[in-house]
Amino acid sequence: MRGATRMSSPTLDRVLDAVLRVDARFDIRFISEQGQRWLNRAPGSELPKNFMDIVHPDDLPALRQILVGTPDSFACDLRILKGTTECWVHLRSYCLTEARELVLCIVDISQWKTEDSALRHAAEHDELTGLPNRAALKRAMEQRIQSNRKVFSVALLDLDGFKNVNDRYGHAMGDAVLVETAKRLSKLLAPGDLIARLGGDEFVLLLEGKQAPAAQQALKNVLRAMARPFNTAPHNAYLGVSIGVAEFPLHGEDYSMLLKNADTAMYQSKNSGKNRITLFARAQAHADLATQAAIHKGIQEGEFFMEYQPQYDMQRRLVGAESLMRWTNTALGRMVPEQFIPIVEVAGLMPFLGKWALRYCCHQLKNFLALDPDFVLSVNVSPTQFNSANFDDQVLEVIAETGINPSRLVLEITESTLMNSQKKNQLALIRLYEQGVRFSIDDFGTGFSSLSYLTRLPVSSIKIDRAFVCAMGEQPAPNNSDRKLIGAMIKLAHSIDLWVVAEGVETQTQYDFLKAAGCNLVQGYLLGRPMSAEALALRFSAQTEAAL
C-alpha cells in the first residue's frame, strides 16, 4: 500500500490475526503480513489507507465515543469490513507516545460471536414455533418496566380443545396446530408488540402502549383468527382460545405478578365458557368475602332484579325484549354485571342465581304475553347453568309452573359454550326444542362460527355481536370489511333458515344498513335502552293504541 510500510513479527502473527500501526488521524502506517492475508489482500496489492474506512459504519459512533479524550489504551469488539464481507473482531490498542502513533492488535472473533448468538437464540426461542420463549418474554417485560414506559398489557392465551387434537390425532398433528397458531398470531402484531410461547398450548402477547380495555378490543381479532378451521388437522379441526389480560402497572409492577394475574383472568375465561377475553379484576383473585355475603343477602332480600331491552323488527315494531340482570345493594349501590358476575362465579353462586333469573323472567313473560301473545323474551343462560346435570328439567319445571307458551321463550347461549357442550347437553337442547323452547346463539362471530354445529344443533336464530355493529362505522365505504362480514353472516343464517338479531344498534346509519342487508330484529340505544317491565309494558300499550 502507498504510504505504509509492511511490518512482520513472527511472534505476533502466530497470536493475532492482524497488527496495524496508525497515526493520530488513523491513517495506516504499518500492517503485518498475517494481517494482509487476513484482509484477503494479495502481496503488493493496494491496502486500506485509513483504519476508519474498514470499520463497519454502524460501529463507528461507538468507536469514536471510546476515543474521546485520546486514551493511552482501549479495547472493544466491533465489525471490520473485508471487501464485501464483515467480521467481528476484538480490537486492543496501545499508544506509542514518542511516535505519536497507535498499535492496533486484532483478533477475529466471528466464530465465537456466531456460536454465542446461536446459543443465545436457542436459549431464548421456542424450538417448535421459533417464537421467543419464557426467558425472552421475561427479559422483554423487565426491559419495558425498567425503562419506565407508561403502559402495556399482557395477554395470556390458552387454546380450547387442543388436548382433544393431541389425544385423537397424535402429537405430530398437535405440533402442526401450534405452528399454525404461531403464524396466525404473528400476523396480528402491531409495531412494538411481542408474541411468545410459554410452553404447551400457552402463548403470551405483549401489547405495547395499550391499557387493558384497548387490548381487549384488539384481541377480538385473535378470536376471529383462531375461529378459522385448522386444516393442519384432519377434518378441519376447530379450536377456540381463552384469553386473560393484565395491565402494567395497574395489575402488577413486575413480571411475575403481571403473568400471574393474566393467568388468573385466563382461567376466568375458561370457567365462563371458553373462547373469550377476560380482563383481570381484583375480585377474580380475591373473591371478596364481604361482597359474597352481600350477594347471598341480596338474593334472599330481593336486591337482584331484571331490566328489559326492547327488540324491534325492521318496521320498528316492538316484538320482544332481552332480559338483563341488575343488582342494587344498600351498601355498594347499583352494580353492573361486569362488576358482580365474576364474584358470583368465583363464589359458586351462578347456578343458584341463574335458576332464579330464569324463574323471574318466565313469570314476567306471562305478564307480557297478556299484552301480546306473540311477544318473545330472550333469557341469557350462563355456561355453568347450561352445563348443570338437570338444565332441561329446570327449564321445563319453570314453564309448567308459569304456564307460558314455551315457543315465546328464547334461551341465549354463547357460541363457545355450544361448541364445547357435551353429548348430554345437546340431548337436553333437543328435548327442550321438542317442547317448543327456542335457542339463539349469543355473541355470534366471536367464536367458531362453524356450519357443522349451526345445522346439527336445534338453533332458531343468531345474535350478531355488538363489536361488529360498532366497528362498521358511519361511512358506507365500499370496501368496509366489517359491513361485508355482517352481510355474510346474515346470508349464512338465512341460507339455513335462521333468524338474525343485531345488538348494539346506536345510529340510524347502522339501522339502515342492517335493514338493507336483511336483518330480522335489532336492539340498541337507537330504539331503546334497558328499562323496567312497567316501562316496557307502557311501550306496548302505546304501540297498540297507535295501531288502532
Image (cartoon, rainbow, N blue to C red):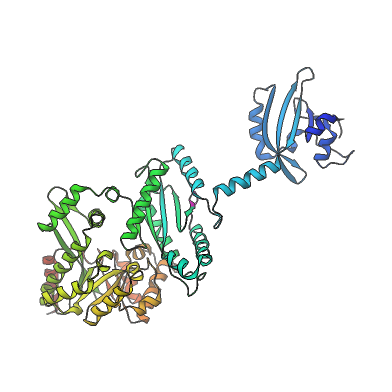
Instruction: Using the image as rendered, state which of residue 455 and residue 352 is in the foreground.
Output: 352
- Quarter of the image with the N terminus in it: top right
Q: Is residue 420 magenta?
A: no
- Magenta stretch, residue numbers: 188-195
Most foreground residue, 57 or 199: 199
Q: Outermost residue, right direction? A: 44
Q: Position of residue 465 (x, y in %)?
A: 33, 66
- Residue 348 horizontal/vertical position (percent): 23, 58
413 left or right of 45 in image: left
Can the viewer see residue 286 in this picture? yes
Decide if residue 483 is on the left or right side of residue 541.
right
Can you tell which quarter of the image residue 10 is in? top right
| Rendered location of residue 255, percent (x, y) | 42, 43
Q: Is residue 371 visible?
A: no
Q: Is residue 234 left or right of residue 507?
A: right
Residue under the point 37% across and 54% down: 244
Kindly identify the residue that appears in the image at 48 percent across and 75 percent down. 235
Give whichever of 393, 343 is nearer the camera: 393
Q: How many marks?
A: 0
Please name the residue shown 82% across and 33% down the image: 13
Q: Residue furthest top?
A: 98
From this view, report whether residue 304 is shown above or below residue 97.
Answer: below
Point out residue 253 in the picture as x, y percentages from the top left corner: 38, 40
**The C terminus sits in image quarter:** bottom left
Is most of the magenta stretch helix, strand or loop? loop
Is 189 magenta? The answer is yes
Q: Is residue 187 above or below residue 135?
A: below
